[in-house]
Structure formats: structure tokens, C-alpha cells
Image (spheres, rainbow, N blue to C red):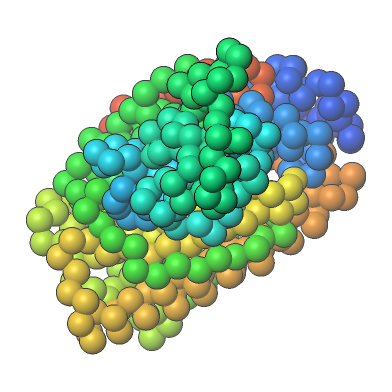
Amino acid sequence: MSIDLPVTPGPAPAPHDALPARPVDPATFGDEATYRHTRLPVDQASTLLPDAYTSPEFFALERERVFATGWVAVGLTADVDRHGACVVVEVAGRSVIVTRNRHGALRAFHNVCRHRATRLLDADAREVGRRGRIRCPYHSWTYDTDGACLGSPLFEGSDVPAGQEPVFDTSVATGFDRADQGLLPVAVDSWGFLLFVHLGRDPGPLREQLGDLPARFADHRLEAWSPRRRRRYDVAANYKLVGENFMEYYHLPWVHPELNRVSRFSDHYRWQGPGMYTGMCTTPVSRNTEAGGWDGPAPLSTLGPDDADSGRFVWLFPSCALVVLPNHAFVLLNRPVAADRTEETAVLLTHPEFVDDEDGRAGLDQLEAFWDLVNRQDLDIVERVQQGLADPAFRGGRMCFRFEEPVHRFQNMVVDRMVGLDRVPAGDDVTAVRMFPDPDTVV
């Protein structure tokens, strides 16, 4: 469970010399003892070992134990809003097609033909194919949006020359049944406007990983929100650094002078219950300054008094940032490419009452510019952290208990998966915990 402030002094933390020497033996990345300094309570803990951000061996194991064993946010429901619409996403090195079948149900499949493993759809595909059929470009094996094999090849529209159809007839093949040749399925689900996939063979329900978030966001009706603006960023840093930067505001005065003027330290609360996420909120939401801010489009009118004047900042394990304010939402979908590289998609969304007129678009322009400014400041600093982590002299640093409890929570989620534990962390006993005992404290 997350701790409340003030922290009760405990035993002295281990000295720096007791931290693991670098590089750590990759054979120990799955051992609990490797992470003993991060497992300590946050007021005594040291950060996750630097190899977790720099080692190709750690990255390879992390893909399998973190990204291939749980629900991962990969896109937006608006991108698959009808039969045959699709997105092609990459998770743990696997290409996955997400689409909807004829009845509107979500379906996902490995992007692999069952014949010779040809990649079926390009990464930028937005439709599965003509008439909602997925056709292999190599030998024309064809599948429907439920993954069933329709033909091998399906003669209609397959470019088989007239008169040569019998040559391609597989009905006489020994032991061959098209019913056994469907696409390899991937578990898929949604919450609000987000799409999730799970590569495991026997995934638990998404709601177990989300914990209490659906209840916390119930009044926002996130399933009705719409994406309006998108940007992509190539980040020369590990995805965890992107996440850990998002989870704390220790850096605000020095990295974000503009944001610091509309997001006061004294207005921050820890906002997390049980679930695979970290959470903070700011309340009340500050008004814009000449440098920008979160004002713009009108807020959703149906929100209760708490939600109507609060910003929620949630990191969905393992790699998605979700910001929900009364008048807009901002999402960062982070795809790990290498130990030191992340591809990031930023999306600005509006609620169902948004008016798409000149004033509304002007408000979106201001929000997009402000978020772009803040995000570029963040990416610049995490890239500098990545550069520092490459120095073998650095073996880990002490957690700052007042600001970094969410970082500690996240790092221990990563450790759980790396050592083979599947558990959902508990949260605070109250909905929001003020990060400072004295609201006027700004140290």
C-alpha cells in the first residue's frame, strides 16, 4: 500500500557502496535479490538499477516479462469505429492487427499469414482490405475479420487467371481443413477511448489490471470522447524514463517554468487506489497565464464538483500516460523500440459536448501548442537522464520520498513482472492524499 506523509523514520538505507556494481550480470535480471534496494520502503529505497534503462539484455527480457504478459494500451477506439477499420500495432516485438468484425465486436490477430508467415498488413494500414477481408500479398490466402480462413486462395478477387482455378484447389489436400487455418488470435479489449491487447494465452480480464480507475472516471464518460490532434515524437530514452518523469512533479520549477505557473505544488495530491497504475491530481485547476495553460474549450457540463475542477494524471502500466481535465484529455502512447529509444504518439481529445467551431478550434490550437511545449521539455530532460545512465559510475540514486512514491510504485510493478510475480498493488485508503502536510509548503 502507498505510504502517507509524514514518513516514520526506519532503518538507515544501504550505503552507495552496497549498490550492485555495473554492469549487472544479465543472468540475474530475473532474481529478486537484484532489486533489493528498490524493494525497500520509498523513504529508504534506491532507484531501479541503471541496467534496466541501458542493457539490451534487460530490454529483451522486459519485452517478454512485462509487455507480453499483461494488458497494454496500444491505440484509440475511434480508429476502429466500424467493420474492417483497423490499426496495426507493435507489442513486445509482435505486430498485431486490431479491427472489428461484422457485428462490431473488437478482434485482434497476430499480423502473420498461416501459410508462410507473411506480414499481412503494413504498419500504416487503416482498413483490413476490400469487403472487410484480409488478404495475404504472397499467396492470396484470405481471412475475414473474425480471423477465419476463407480461401487458400479465395478465388474471388484473388487474381487467379480464368480457367486455372482447379490448380489452386486445396479441397483435395490430405489432412487440410481451412477451419484449422484461421489467424492467430490476440486478446483485445477497451476502456473509455483506449484499446488494449494482451499477448498471453490465458489473460485475466482487463478490469483486474485497471482496478478502481473505471469507477474513478465514471462521470467523465470517456468512451464518448474523440481524438482531435496527434503528434509523434522519437525519444532517445528508455520508455520507463518517460513514465517516471510523468509520475512526479519534483522537476516542475526547473524544467517547466510555464507549467509551474498553472500547476502549483500545493495543489498536488496522490490519487491512486488498487490497480496497475500510478496517479496524481491537481485541484483546483489553475487558469491560463500568458504562457498558456489548460483552459480553452468549455468543460463537460455533467461533471460533479470534484471532477469539474480537477486534473487527473494517470500512468497506465506499463507504457501509457493519461491526462483527463474537465475540458480535454491528453494521451501519450509509448512504444519501446530499444533500451534507449521510444516512439511516442501524443493525442489530444475532446469530450462529447465539444463544439467544433472557430472558437473551439482556436482553443485546441492553444492546448496543442501548450502540450507540445511541455512534452518537448520533458523529452529533452529524459534524454539527458538516458545519457547520464550510460556512465558506469552511476549505480543508482536515493528516492525522494515526498515526490517519488508513484515512481517507487511503478518501479516495483516492473520488478514484480521481471521476477515472475503477477499482482496488483493496493492504493491509499482515501481517494486523494495531499502531497504536502502544509498546503502552503512549496519546497
Quadrant in which the N terminus appears: top left
Residue 293 or 183: which is nearer the viewer?
183
Residue 107 or 365: which is nearer the viewer?
107
Q: Position of residue 134 (x, y in %)?
A: 47, 45
Residue found at x 44% / y 34% = 150
Residue 119 figure quarter: top right
Where is 219 relative to 67, above or below?
Answer: below
Q: Position of residue 227 (x, y in %)?
A: 34, 63
Residue found at x 42% / y 62% = 347
Where is 215 relative to 246, above or below?
Answer: above
Residue 377 figure quarter: bottom right
Residue found at x 45% / y 57% = 126
Q: Position of residue 106 (x, y in %)?
A: 34, 38
Residue 111 appears anywhere in the view:
no
Q: Residue furthest front?
A: 163
Where is 38 relative to 121, above or below?
Answer: above
With 251 as the anchor, is 157 left or right in this view? left
With 134 as the anchor, is 245 left or right in this view? right
Residue 234 figure quarter: bottom right
Q: Residue furthest left?
A: 302
Q: Position of residue 38 (x, y in %)?
A: 66, 29
With 45 as the anchor, is 392 left or right in this view? right
Q: How many marks?
A: 0
Residue found at x 80% / y 57% = 387
Q: Residue furthest top?
A: 175
Residue 210 or 397: which is nearer the viewer?
210
With 91 as the anchor, is 357 left or right in this view? left
Residue 394 appears anywhere in the view:
yes
